[in-house]
Amino acid sequence: YKLQYMLGSSPQHVQVEGLICKIIPSIDSMTSYRMRDADGEEGLYIGSTNVDRNAHGEGSLEYEDGKRFVGKFQNGSMVDGVLYRGSHIRHTLKRGKWTKSIDDVLVEKYPSNVIVYDQSGSILKSNIGGDAKTTDDYSSA
């Protein structure tokens, strides 16, 4: 990918590798707020909440560094799910604890819903609705 921007009156070009572009659905129809995970890392939660407006039910936590947790939340805490960076599976969480190995059942239940395109615009990898699982590292994570 190539990122172009203007500094003052002269154009500058920057070569970017491993760029992750996030498209977040309209927040008008969903609840979202900033929250911290059990490790203290902050992100934007998008999903359902309980009466106290805490993350509760299925949702995602979008981290600033490109990671995304997709899964089940209960009273503001992550319970079950998968931590992704792009379409790369980083970890799985079961009953509030990180698993020692990737849990394929959780990956199938909580897909990344990410499409990765190559430079020509062709689909390189897809994980929409759990149709493909990958642990290949296609970019610097």
Image: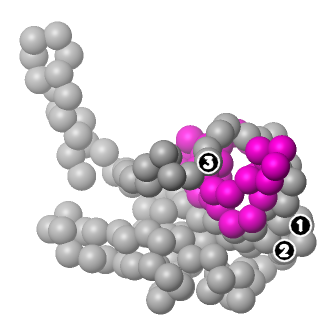
CA gap, disc 1 to disc 2? Answer: 5 Å
According to the picture, the residue beneath numbered tag 1 turns out to be 97
The residue at the point 17 percent across, 22 percent down is 6
Is residue 24 in view?
A: no
Task: Give the quarter of the image for residue 52.
Answer: top right
At numbered mark 1, what does the secondary structure look like: helix, strand or loop?
strand
Instruction: Looking at this view, name the residue that lies furthest to the left.
Output: 10
Residue 27 versus residue 136: which sits nearer the camera? 27
Magenta-drawn stretch contains 117 = no
User: What kind of colouring is applied to the model shown?
Assistant: one colour
Disc 2 from disc 3: Cα separation: 24 Å
> In the picture shown, does residue 106 fall above or below 77?
below
Tag on residue 31? 3
Residue 61, given in percent of the width and then of the height, sits at 64, 53
Quick one: label 1, few (<14), some, or many (20+) residues within 10 Å?
few
The prevailing secondary structure element of the residues shown in magenta is strand
In the image, residue 55 lies in the stretch drawn in magenta: yes
* Tag 1 near tag 2, CB within 8 Å: yes
Q: Which of marks 2 and 3 is nearer the N terminus?
A: 3
Residue numbers of the magenta segment: 41-68
Mark 3 element type: strand
Query: Given the image, on which type of amino acid does mark 1 rest?
Result: Lys
Is 21 positioned to the left or the right of 38 in the image? left
Query: How far across and down, in percent of the image, does residue 25 sit?
Result: 44, 54
Residue kind at label 3, given as amino acid type? Thr
Q: Residue furthest front?
A: 51
Residue named by callout 2: 94
| Residue type, mark 2 in image | Lys
Residue 2 x, y percent position in the rendering: 21, 46
> In front: 119, or 94?
94
